[in-house]
Image (spheres, grey):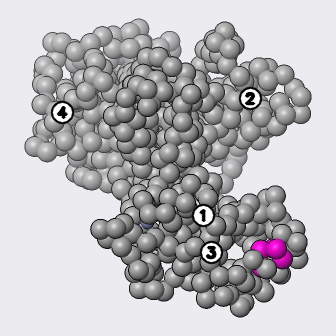
């Protein structure tokens, strides 16, 4: 039988308080300078160390030290071995009274507490009252507590712990010093878990109650991501995994133990939605069913995934800004690795598309709660998202209009490039009419150069787990890549504006340049770096670009019909005006 890891690895000193350095520092300072307050409010999510901190404070106030280093007054570094420290750690100290307001919320309980407050500490210097979930007290009980706080005896410290500080009367809060416990970051939690595993493995098998713990770092990160910022939940999950027994623990085991959807499945379904592959979406649902996936849980997890995409879109630059990432990590369980994987999806979806997907999935979730069939609701939601033309709502209509426009644009573009692709000219279009837009024909034309490979700074490592990169995907992201380039180097942007990605072999992208002038400009030193960084930001990969003039490509071109048109908003707006007989409104 294993021991409780959470109890065993509870922090015992201020310095062990992970992720709450600001609170530890202030309390240590108060103890050292003899300015400990009569009452504290410890507010924060569950499992962030509120009661552990209260106990450390109690030890600091009462520690008498060792024979070698006796303490005659409170110390910021309680010894952990004296009678007082040990009694407090073991929850048997007569001077530390822990009370759970969830079950002792009546006025009688508080009156009883008040009566006891009047007595001096039994053994130590200070009595410490820890009232957990204090917001649960009744109004009468709060009034009784307030009277105590108004005339506190000299050697009593109250710690009021709560997950919902807004439910505590202002009159109480104003008499306390308040600390807000933060959710620790994913990496703080993973580090703590790694420390626990390490010290567990230093014990003998007997002490440990089982074989050594083998767990991948990625699995620790996965536990941390799903702990909602609580140490207790994280350690609880670790304990559960260890108790399953033999063999190394992998990230997939973590997700299975937690009953949450594998991350790759969430990325996959989002890609299917981005690319509007309706048939594949339905096959995907069938696959989930075969795997025994719980559909309501899946929709919950997909909503969480979409929320992360949504947040990334609205916190522009967050991926590069460490402080912003930290702030983000505290609310959405994101870490650098996850952000790196999410960025491509965030960049390929319009923010309103993400909002639409969240709304559609949210509706499915509500319908399932109302008793409708979960699988059918998921299928319907995916069809709506991948085929907006079947969605009769206003958003669906708007989406249809957008697709209609880009469809027209695609036809036009296909005509323009048809000659260059050596395909038969479109019917009714005289071949001569194309000559001014068609690029020089390969391979005999003058001015065609063989592709020149430019040394890219560094190719993405093979272990990169980003989604599969296709030429189609690069083309769809091209406008975004150009926007990134524009923000760094306007000259390079100007040279690339009329270029287009024409082939992709592995991570080598061929970019066809419109003119010799642009080709020369784009090959100036330093440009490959800027472009590679723009690809990394947008697609999560540093693609190596080869620049060629005209239509020379190193791999066979894809059918022209699959090409995406370059985004041309002027044209779209004109088309909309024509179709809808509409006028542009001036922005206020
Ligand atoms: Zn001690």
Give coordinates of residue 255: x percent, y percent: 55, 27
> Label 4 crowding class (10 Å Cα cut-off): few <14, some 14-19, many 20+?
few
Alpha carbon separation for disc pair 1 and 4 = 61 Å
Is disc 2 surrounded by few (<14), some (14 to 19) or many (20+) residues within 10 Å? some
Say whether disc 2 or disc 1 marks the residue closer to the N-terminus: 1
- Point out the stretch of residues depicted in magenta: 110-114
Q: Which disc, if any, is residue 458? A: 4
Q: Earlier in the sequence, mark 2 or mark 4?
A: 2
Q: Mark 2 to mark 4: distance in Å?
A: 42 Å
Q: Residue at x 50, y 45 (%)?
A: 8
Nearest the viewer among 303 and 153 is 153
Q: Quadrant of ligand 1?
A: bottom left
Q: Secondary structure at mark 3?
A: loop
Quarter of image, res 534: top left
Mark 1 lies on residue: 93
Vertical relation: 118 (above or below) 381: below
The quadrant of the image that shows the N terminus is top right
Q: Nearer the viewer, residue 425 or 125?
A: 125
Can residue 459 be seen here? yes
User: Which label belongs to residue 467?
Assistant: none
Compared with 489, 360 (above or below) is above
Residue that label 2 marks: 296
Disc 1 crowd, CA 10 A, few/some/many (<14, 14-19, 20+): some
Q: Residue furthest front?
A: 67
Helix, strand or loop at mark 1:
loop
Nearer-the-camera pick, 462 or 93: 93
Q: Which mark is nearer the camera, 2 or 4?
A: 2
């Amino acid at each position: 039988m294993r021991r409780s890891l959470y109890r065993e690895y509870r922090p015992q000193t201020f310095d062990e308080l992970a992720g709450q350095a600001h609170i530890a520092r202030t309390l240590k300072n108060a103890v050292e300078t003899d300015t400990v307050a009569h009452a504290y409010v410890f507010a924060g999510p569950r499992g962030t160390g509120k009661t552990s901190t209260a106990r450390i404070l109690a030890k600091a106030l009462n520690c008498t030290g060792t024979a070698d280093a006796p303490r005659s007054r409170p110390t910021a570094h309680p010894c952990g071995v004296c009678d007082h420290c040990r009694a407090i750690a073991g929850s048997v100290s007569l001077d530390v009274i822990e009370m759970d307001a969830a079950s002792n919320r009546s006025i009688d309980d508080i009156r009883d507490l008040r009566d006891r407050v009047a007595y001096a500490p039994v053994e130590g210097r200070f009595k410490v009252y820890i009232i957990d979930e204090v917001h649960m007290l009744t109004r009468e009980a709060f009034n009784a507590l307030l009277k105590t706080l108004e005339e506190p005896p000299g050697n009593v410290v109250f710690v009021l712990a709560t997950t919902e500080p807004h439910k505590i009367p202002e009159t109480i809060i104003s008499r306390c010093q308040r600390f807000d416990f933060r959710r620790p970051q994913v990496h703080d939690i993973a580090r703590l878990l790694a420390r626990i595993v390490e010290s567990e493995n230093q014990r003998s098998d007997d002490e440990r109650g089982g074989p050594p713990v083998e767990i991948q770092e990625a699995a620790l990160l996965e536990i941390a991501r799903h702990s909602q910022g609580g140490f207790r939940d994280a350690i609880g999950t670790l304990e559960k995994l260890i108790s399953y027994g033999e063999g190394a623990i992998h990230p997939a085991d973590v997700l299975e133990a937690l009953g949450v959807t594998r991350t790759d499945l969430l990325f996959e379904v989002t890609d299917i939605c981005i690319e509007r592959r309706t048939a594949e979406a339905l096959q995907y649902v069938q696959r989930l069913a075969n795997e025994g996936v719980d559909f309501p849980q899946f929709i919950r997890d997909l909503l969480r995934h979409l929320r992360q995409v949504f947040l990334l879109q609205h916190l522009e630059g967050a991926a590069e800004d460490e402080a912003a990432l930290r702030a983000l990590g505290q609310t959405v369980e994101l870490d650098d690795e996850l952000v790196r994987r999410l960025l491509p999806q965030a960049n390929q979806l319009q923010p309103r598309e993400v909002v639409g997907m969240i709304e559609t999935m949210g509706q499915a979730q509500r319908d399932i709660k109302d008793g409708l069939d979960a699988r059918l609701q998921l299928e319907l939601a995916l069809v709506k998202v991948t085929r907006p033309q079947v969605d009769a709502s206003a958003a669906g209509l708007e989406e249809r209009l957008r697709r209609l426009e880009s469809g027209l644009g695609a036809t036009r573009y296909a005509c323009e490039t048809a000659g260059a692709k050596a395909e038969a000219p479109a019917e009714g279009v005289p071949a001569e009419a194309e000559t001014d837009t068609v690029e020089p024909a390969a391979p005999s034309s003058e001015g065609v150069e063989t592709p020149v490979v430019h040394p890219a700074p560094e190719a993405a490592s093979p272990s990169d787990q980003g989604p599969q990169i296709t030429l189609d995907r690069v083309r769809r992201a091209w406008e975004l890549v150009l926007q990134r380039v524009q923000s760094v180097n306007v000259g390079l942007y100007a040279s690339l504006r009329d270029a287009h990605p024409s082939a992709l072999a592995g991570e080598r992208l061929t970019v066809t340049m419109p003119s010799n002038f642009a080709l020369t400009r784009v090959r100036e030193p330093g440009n490959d770096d800027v472009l590679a960084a723009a690809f990394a930001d947008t697609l999560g990969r540093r693609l190596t670009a080869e620049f060629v003039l005209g239509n020379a490509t190193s791999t066979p071109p894809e059918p022209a019909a699959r090409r995406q048109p370059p985004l041309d908003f002027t044209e779209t707006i004109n088309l909309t005006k024509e179709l809808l007989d509409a006028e542009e409104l001036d922005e206020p």
